[in-house]
Amino acid sequence: MRTIFLVLLLLLPAIASGQVATIDLYTGEVPVETQDSAERRRALPQTLEHVFKKLSGLNDFEDYPLVEPALGSASSILLSFHYRKEETVLADGSEASELRLVASFSEAKVEEMVQSLQLPLWKPDRPPLDIWIIVDDGVDRRTFPLEFSYAWRSMGEEAVRRGLNVRWPVPDEDGQYQIDAQLLWGGYTEDLGAGQRGGVMIAAARREGPEWSVRNNVSYNGEDWTWRVQDIDLQSALTQSMQQAIDRIAAANTIAAAELGLWGYQLTIGGLRNAHDYQRCLAYLQGLSVVNHVAVISAGQGNVVFKLELSAVPQYLEEALGTGKFMELSEDDGKYFLLP
């Protein structure tokens, strides 16, 4: 059983709950046949398109006809490139290797292009999505059955391709998951910490004749969705489920192009007792994706007045501050107070 556990760890896209890979939103990658320069020139615009997809949350640009001609400038904003091999486990247990071109682009230039193309912006602050999979093959009902590991690996690869971090639960040393299968089968995401920052996805797959039916329950940042996907192939059904989950998550966390730009915002925060509180507050504000720059206008008697430069309408800053996890708004004077 320990051998099965170790194999499972190797196959999962992430090996520990709570640990997520860092996704570089300004780096794109695509499969290529060779490493010669002609093939690289052909593929380079596709890597920039991949970057646009991760930044916008869109899976295609049918409604943005100016994107395709803009991709021709990929080489002019390229910072670096390299190649890597992606090893994939297939349904029959065999392995396949795919060569990929990985290209990194200028962050500033990409952002200029995104703005000029009027693309939406999927906010870069993207808490991870915890994924649970339970499968009923007509014989029994199991959580993450090992023989289908290739299928959920495909889900993880799709999430990374679209720019969303995911986390996978880790079994104990006997290969078991300490969770009630009925809870998973019922799609009760709220019992898996869906109220916390980030979200939970439960994909419950059942074999129904020649087809697989996957019921998906997703909770993310206070939004909830339920839908079904049917396909004759389980890997295809789960990959479609992941794509549709990201479509929903991205759409719910996207800033429209018309709401992007530069805005000034004055923010007063009270309850700062010492230099440590000030540093906590400053780090928090600088870490918000909608904040470009933070400056101090005045400070005294536990209050600090900040001047912020925002990259989107102030509504998005106020939504971030309104979570009540770091500071609270005083309705009396419009001042925010730092929480302990």
Image (cartoon, helix red, strand yellow):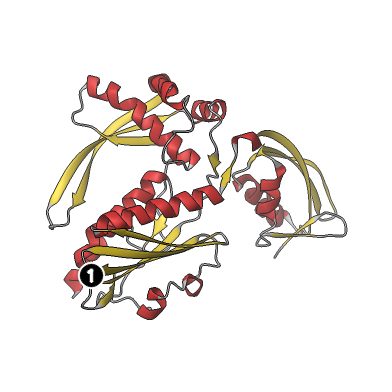
| Residue at x-position 48% and y-position 24% | 66
Looking at the rendered structure, the number of numbered marks drawn on it comes to 1
When asked about the image quadrant of residue 75, the answer is: top left
Q: How far from the left and from the top, in percent, is residue 79?
A: 40, 26
Q: Is residue 12 visible?
A: no
- Residue 161 versus residue 107 in the image, above or below: below
Q: Nearer the viewer, residue 221 or 24?
A: 221
Name the residue that disc number 1 marks.
Answer: 5
What element does badge 1 sit on?
helix
| Residue at x-position 19% and y-position 70% | 4
Point out the residue furthest to the right here. Answer: 332
Q: How far from the left and from the top, in percent, is residue 206?
A: 29, 69
Q: Left or right? Give the position of 324 relative to 125.
A: right
Quarter containing the C terminus: bottom right
- Residue 59 versus residue 148 in the image, above or below: above
Quarter containing the N terminus: bottom left
Q: Nearer the viewer, residue 296 or 169?
A: 169
Q: Nearer the viewer, residue 340 or 174?
A: 174
Q: Left or right? Give the position of 150 relative to 170.
A: left
> Mark 1, residues whose alpha carbon is within 10 Å: few (<14), some, or many (≥20)?
some
Q: Is residue 57 visible?
A: yes
Q: How far from the left and from the top, in percent, is residue 62?
A: 44, 33
Q: Amino acid at mark 1?
A: Phe
Q: Left or right? Give the position of 110 relative to 166.
A: right
